[in-house]
Image (cartoon, grey):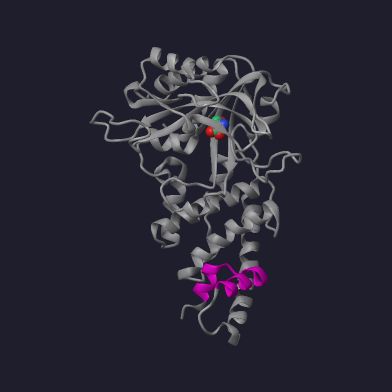
Amino acid sequence: MNTDRIVSTFTDYFREHGHELVTGGTLLPPPSDPVLFTTSGMHPLTPHLEGRPHPQGRRLTSVQRCLRTTDLDEVGDRTHLTVFEMLGSWSLGDYGHSQSLRWGHELLRDGFGIPPERMHVTVFGGDDEVGPDDESLGTWRELGLPVELTSDENWWSHGPVGLCGPDSEIFVWTGDPGTPPQGSPTTDPRWVEVWNHVSMRYRRLEDGGLQLLQQPNVDTGMGLERLATVLQGHDSVYDSDLFEPWTRLLPPLWDLDEPSTRLVCDHLRSGIAVIGDGVRPSNTGRGYVLRRLTRRVLTTLWRDDPSRTLSDLPTELLGHTLDHFRQPGDTGRVRGVLVDEERRFGRLLERGRRVLGRPRFEGPLSDEDYRYLHDTHGLPRDLVTTLRTP
Ligand code: SER
């Protein structure tokens, strides 16, 4: 099943069950939100989970693009991405958690064809504040799925204060299909979490207390790229259809090792999506995130060959990314932003070479030197190292 089919299977299912599709999906939260980028599917719905009526009703579904830069150094491995999409469903004080779990089970089994023998779930087993989630436990037992109880791992919160509640996570077995699944989600990493159903019925207060929300909500989120990777039987998200044009077109253009190819694919794809949502490189805020992503790409490309240029980026990749994120942008304009940033960075490096030619930087560099070069001249540490390598 390709990614487009996965998305339509998900949203069609929830629409058939009375949910309205929330469109938009931009990476940019509204101006009143202090966070730079949308970080999860439920993020734009926070005021409505807090109780403000939503104009589209009490049952919602969405496909939300998200950006997280907290794991930047992990990018290049098999799974981490800076921009990803979340499939989500919500009950804003409408149906209960048990209904959500039943629909989740049915959609994974009948819609996505995952045999129930390859599913395992986890449920909140209670702690000293809140009792065990017996409702979910009962529902899963009725549906015949193996359940593991945990406490910390099944309590969802976004931060020290605000919305929170017990959750139930659905895992899929990714081990050899010929042998029966082993262990449980906390004991065997071949169980991969695909879908989180949160019973969002509490608010954590500043003083640490827990308050019941006026309306008990259900908030679910499933990472699209991870689901596609699991359904398509791959180990790495880069082997899924989502990256097909990238993994076909980039290696012949730029001969890099595998982690570097992945980093370049991820960051360029994210850069295109961020530009597609209207951001331009700058030294602050969102523009700085875009600048960092682009410069990390260029640093990687230029490490072996400074003649590489984003002018060579195939138009198909720009078009594929904008289409995938349902962005109307024009490929020429997006490329213009990237190439402009490349020129700017190229000039910065020239200046860097001149600065590094000063006698002060002849010997080994201290942390303070690196800090000075970064803070005063905008030269990242790994680039300085490269510039100094004979
Ligand atoms: N709030 C849950 C998550 O972020 C489900 O949307 O995973």
- Residue 203 in the image: x percent, y percent? 65, 28
How many numbered tags mark residues here? Answer: 0
Foreground of the two, 150 or 14: 150
User: The N terminus appears in which quarter of the rendering?
Assistant: top left
Foreground of the two, 73 or 204: 204
Q: Give above or below for 93 relative to 27.
A: above
- Residue 63 in the image: x percent, y percent? 57, 32
For residue 190, side relative to residue 323 (left or right): left
**Quarter residue 86 falls in:** top right
Residue drawn at x 69%, y 21% is 56
Residue drawn at x 59%, y 39% is 65
**Quarter residue 55 falls in:** top right
Q: Residue furthest right?
A: 32
Q: Give above or below for 274 relative to 210.
A: below
Q: Residue furthest left?
A: 179
For residue 234, side relative to residue 72 (left or right): left
For residue 248, side relative to residue 45 (left or right): left
Foreground of the two, 137 or 32: 137
Q: Residue furthest bottom?
A: 359
Q: Is residue 75 visible to us here?
A: no
As for residue 386 lying within the magenta part, the answer is: yes
Q: Is residue 223 visible to us here?
A: yes
Residue drawn at x 53%, y 77% is 365
- Residue 160 in the image: x percent, y percent? 62, 38
- Residue 134 in the image: x percent, y percent? 47, 16
Image-quarter location of ligand 1: top right
**Magenta region, main secondary structure:** helix
As for residue 298 lying within the magenta part, the answer is: no
Q: Residue furthest top?
A: 142
For residue 167, side relative to residue 280 (left or right): left
Foreground of the two, 63 or 215: 215
* Range shown magenta: 367-387
